Amino acid sequence: MAGQGEAVPIRAIANGPLTGEAQIPGDKSVSHRALILGALAVGETRISGLLEGEDVIDTGKAMRAFGATVERHGPGEWSVHGVGVGGFREPQGVIDFGNSGTGVRLVMGAMATSNVTATFTGDASLCSRPMGRIVDPLALFGARAHGRKGGFLPITLVGAENPVPVRYVTPMPSAQVKSAVLLAGLNAPGTTIVTEREPTRDHTERMLAGFGARIETEVTPEGRVIRLQGHPELRPQRVSVPRDPSSAAFPVAAALIVEGSAITVPGVSRNPTRAGFYETLLEMGARIGFANVREEGGEPVADLEVAFSALQGVEVPPERAASMIDEYPVLAALASFAEGPTVMRGIGELRVKECDRIDAMAEGLEACGVSVEQGPDYMIVHGRGARGVRGGATVRSRLDHRIAMSFLCFGLGTEQEVVIDDGRPIATSFPDFTGLMRGLGAEFAG
Ligand code: S3P
């Protein structure tokens, strides 16, 4: 689990251009959902390209605790023998989700309408993240939660004995909240209806349809209305996990800021609900191409071709936030190398991620000579141009994989080296990040 044992500092040192091919691991969101839906289907689901990061491994362990058989057959090759909707058995011990908000929130949803009780916990980061946003809608189905004051983990969730279907409007743009409600709706009779005002990643909807659930999405003036019929028999599937666009963002950003770089990143998901970062890069003047666009495992994918670019600061439209919510830290790093300010508004959700990501980026960038303004839901990075960023500081990664990776990429373009105080959180989502980056020519030292 991230945060156990000794901290592992890593230094990023400018070392000339990045070149070659980056094989990005499987998408984290799709990997969690493949294990959970596999566990809720009757029979054997086969998964290829599963992300073997700590977060996803924890979800696999949780599915075992609820009675599914989860096995690894080779790198990224997994099978899940599911127990069917409503078939979860009661776990014997406490379920520890480590650093993973997605894992714990989706699994709470998946169990909330089964007649079982389970206790969930996590690391220091996860235990400080809001869970009221999940347990409140789950209470509408009849589930009862007992946790710390303020709705923090550890939480014991008592699943509803006689669940009822729910109509719910998500109060914040969150695919985790939407997904928790939909997964709970599987074992409620009748139709569960979730409305989201702004579209968030739609992997749960796509995958539920693929597993045979009756689910439809209607775009209305109030937002996206998703209707799910309860009590489907989910059919096991072969799931091929596309490569994670949020992980790809790191080598892409590094190649854009290190002079002379040219890399390719094959097979990355181009799901429109995840595409905001790449749209923003194009607006900044990034030289990035999307070749060989095709469909893999129910998701659009493309091969990215990226070259060092002179970047301009931009104003990112707030309505784009949900489609790039995990990419703001690396965008802030990259924006330091652009000409002029990059303005990011409507990003209050960043304050309740693995850490307060607005504050973490502002603190680290300021220490490295970049001026940053921040407010409750915005951040403005004053770019210094491709050659004007000093670096030369040790920054805190705050138990947050994306903060750690953002500053390591940042340090490949700065005049002086950049040190992160702890690289261990990277294993939650991108275990071979340093190896992959070194393969492109990056210099990281202990
Ligand atoms: C995720 C949803 C997002 C995102 C997280 C993964 C998912 O969180 O930040 O990394 O897989 O559903 P929110 O739902 O809190 O926005």
Image (spheres, rainbow, N blue to C red):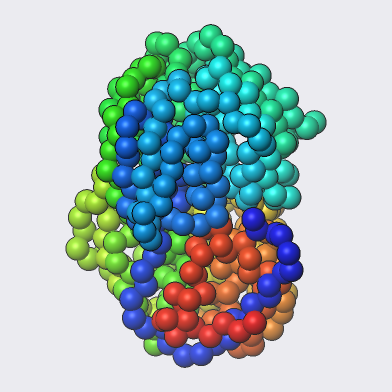
Q: Which is more toward the observer, 344 or 49?
A: 49
Question: Above or below — where is 430 with respect to 262?
Answer: above
Q: What residue do we see at 58% from left, 21% from top?
A: 116
Horizontal and vertical percent position of residue 406: 56, 68
Question: Image check: 100 left or right of 64?
Answer: right
Q: Quadrant of residue 26?
A: bottom left
Q: What residue do we see at 42% from left, 11% from top?
A: 189
In this view, the residue farthest toward the bottom is 16
Q: Which is more toward the observer, 22 or 240?
A: 240
Q: Which is more toward the observer, 441 or 121?
A: 121
Horizontal and vertical percent position of residue 78: 37, 49
Q: Quadrant of the N terminus?
A: bottom right
Q: Is residue 406 visible?
A: no
Question: Above or below — where is 67 with respect to 245?
Answer: above
Horizontal and vertical percent position of residue 73: 36, 54
Question: Above or below — where is 199 with respect to 194?
Answer: below
Q: Quadrant of residue 13?
A: bottom right
Question: Image check: 241 left or right of 374?
Answer: left
Q: What residue do we see at 71% from left, 60% from top?
A: 4
Question: Above or below — where is 305 with respect to 331?
Answer: below
**Tally of numbered discs:** 0
Q: Quadrant of residue 400?
A: bottom right
Q: What residue do we see at 69% from left, 28% from top?
A: 156
Question: Image check: 104 left or right of 35?
Answer: right
Q: Is residue 433 visible?
A: yes
Horizontal and vertical percent position of residue 208: 34, 32
Q: Quadrant of the C terminus?
A: bottom right
